[in-house]
Image (spheres, rainbow, N blue to C red):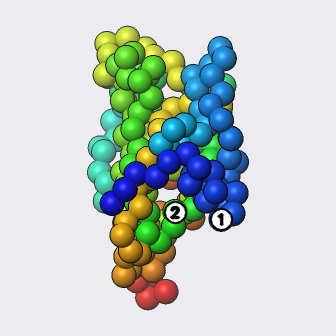
Amino acid sequence: MSIMPDHWIREQSKENAMIEPFTESQKAEGIISYGLSSYGYDARLSDEFMIFTNVDNAIVDPKNFSKQSFVERKADVCVIPPNSFVLCRTVEYFRIPKDVLVICLGKSTYARCGLIVNVTPLEPGWEGQVTLEISNTTPLPAKVYANEGIAQFLFYKGHSPCEVTYADRAGKYMGQKGVTLPRLKTMEDAAE
């Protein structure tokens, strides 16, 4: 596997709409940077936030996730409570080629403030807006900014395409738009 450079990311985004909208170069003046970098792409945070709360004493259960665990906000800034997290999404929509695996890492600006961005790999054949989890590891409230950089995506190209892609498996998060909560695949999903 090889990490792919800026010119390959640009080519894939222009010819195959791998990243939409695509920002040709780093935008950074007065904001947290986003756009094409040397060996990656820094995606932006949308203005849709689901802030974790314990108001209703809901239990966090990935098999039976309650939307009551969150307060929804649409704003230019989100304040994450101390020792809590927020679910959000990228502005960009990604379409991952069959021979590429994408790894996401949080921006250092946020990491230096105690904010950790967590995303599982974007698998070959997957597409959608990426749901992000941002953890505030500090004992203080912390801000994140919509329409500014949040995480860098690194593209690793395999020696050949995989036999079965995420799309072939009809993965449960395929084509997601907006912030997507945990899901389980059902028998109906398997029959389709």
Disc 1 packing (10 Å; few <14; some 14–19; many ≥20): few
Disc 2 packing (10 Å; few <14; some 14–19; many ≥20): many
Which one is earlier in the sequence, the residue at label 1 or at label 2?
1
Res 171 visible:
no
Name the residue rendered at 37%, 66% in the picture.
Answer: 158
Which residue position holds label 2? 96
Residue 182 x/y as whole percent: 40, 55
Res 28 visible:
yes
Under circle 1, the secondary element is helix
Residue type pointed to by label 1: Asn
Between 6 and 163, the one nearer to me in the picture? 6
Residue 121 x/y as whole percent: 37, 54
Residue 78 x/y as whole percent: 56, 24
Which residue position holds label 1? 16
Relative height, residue 87 to residue 8 (above, below): above
Residue type pointed to by label 2: Ile
Q: Is residue 95 left or right of residue 83?
A: right
Residue 140 x/y as whole percent: 37, 11
How far apart marks 1 and 2 lie (CA) works out to 10 Å
Name the residue rendered at 37%, 56% in the picture.
Answer: 2
Between 41 and 111, the one nearer to me in the picture? 41
- Quarter of the image where the N terminus is located: bottom left
Name the residue rendered at 41%, 44% in the picture.
Answer: 104
Report the residue that reaches farthest toward the top: 140
Name the residue rendered at 31%, 22% in the picture.
Answer: 137
- Between marks 1 and 2 in the image, the one whose residue lies nearer the viewer: 1
Q: Is residue 78 left or right of residue 172?
A: right
Q: Is residue 129 left or right of residue 186?
A: right
Q: Quadrant of residue 169?
A: bottom left
